[in-house]
Amino acid sequence: MKKHNFYAGPSILSQYTINKTAEAIHDFAGTGLSILEISHRSKEFTAVIEEAQQLFKELLDIPQGYHVLFLGGGASLQFCMVPFNLLKSKAAYLDTGTWANKAIKEAKLFGQVDVVASSKPDNYTYIPKDYTVPADADYFHITTNNTIYGTEIRQDFDLPVRLVADMSSDIFTRPIDVSKYDIIYGGAQKNIAPAGVTFVIVKEDALGKVERAIPTMLDYRTHVDKGSMFNTPPVLPIFSAVQTLRWYKEMGGVKRLEQLDNEKAALLYDAIDSSRLFVGTVAHEDRSIMNVCFVMKPEYKDLEKDFLDFASSRGIVGIKGHRSVGGFRASLYNALPIDSVRVLVEAMKDFENKH
Ligand SMILES: *Cc1c(COP(=O)(O)O)cnc(C)c1O
């Protein structure tokens, strides 16, 4: 049976990416060797990492003065690398969910942290809007898409301080004005590649401002100087990332991806809003177009397990909600075809008709 993959991460990749990766595992760039067994310093792989940087710059329209890095350690390591490299005395953070919280915890190891606002008392069902960022903060950190709670910031803030964003789960879903940010980072396993590589877009001017000693591997300047080749980079995920980015380019770039993502999200949110059984969990104006969270209305709560079984009988995979929200979460990453959303919506309607 055809599967419809709604996992939140690692998550669906384009068939193009998977096919090209499979080919390279057997024979990489005509070398007669697998990509798994070739030097990262070979000319064939050097060309791959350079293309990865180039495609990031092109697709996101990254201006001069920025570097694109491919590192290990996941987005979670960035929670510590950001303050290690940027926090002199005080940083400001917006608390919009689990990942933001984890970032805050790490920053506290390096200095004062001002949490300017938090939607935690309401179980992170909205993005706080009423706050001021202290003008003397070294930077302001946001999580643009809250993968677990299904809220999203879809605008680029104009601020008097440096802006840092975790875009793990919504990179390449809209044009962004990179010049407004000093650092944008994220794990690749939501919208780009298999797990194992983290992208970091860093402004040259943000670096070298702190006094503290930074361990070599945690210092962005190490990786800037060596073009992400100070040590062995995650070769295979970087190769897959290039395939995905080529596919994005071929499709028409981030503007086109945004249109398609909006269509998919609208289809599912409309089904939720017009349903007798289901209800969304977050404020409408802050709804994520990547991770759609919904539950059964209180009077139908005991049907949740039945719906999961019903959906899985139709090939729908990965819609069980995160334990901190419950219910369901359908992740609609770029590689998910709109037909999969149609299948989910139809399953919701058919299930509703039975109850
Ligand atoms: C998945 C996710 C992370 C964690 O990424 P790792 O690569 O597992 O460390 C961090 N932030 C956001 C927004 C995420 O969705």
Image (tube, rainbow, N blue to C red):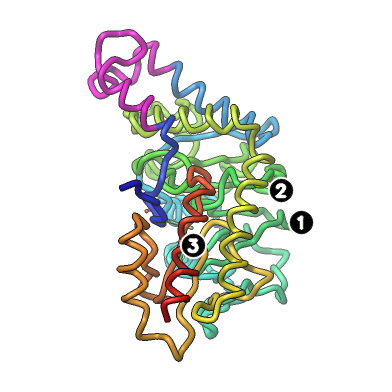
Quick check: is 34 in the magenta stretch? yes
Residue at which label 1 appears: 158
> Cβ–Cβ below 8 Å for labels 1 and 2?
yes
Quarter in which the C terminus is drawn:
bottom left
> For the view shown, which residue lies furthest in the front direction?
354
Residue visible at 42% across and 46% down? 214
Q: Who comes first in sequence, dot 1 or dot 3?
A: 1
Badge 1 amino acid: Asp
The answer to which of 98 and 160 lies nearer the viewer is 98
For disc 2, the marked residue is 180
Residue for badge 3: 346
Which is nearer the eye, 275 or 165?
275
* Three-letter amino acid code of the residue under disc 2: Lys
Would residue 90 appear left or right of 238 to someone viewing this image?
right
- The answer to which of marks 2 and 3 sits earlier in the sequence is 2
In the image, residue 238 sits, relative to residue 171, either above or below, namely above
Give the CA separation, mark 1 to mark 2: 7 Å
Considering the numbered disc 1 on the image, is that residue within a helix, a strand or a loop? loop
Q: Position of residue 262 (x, y in %)?
A: 64, 53
Q: Which image quadrant is residue 153 in?
A: bottom right
* Residue drawn 37% across the image and 32% down it: 18
The magenta segment is 18-46
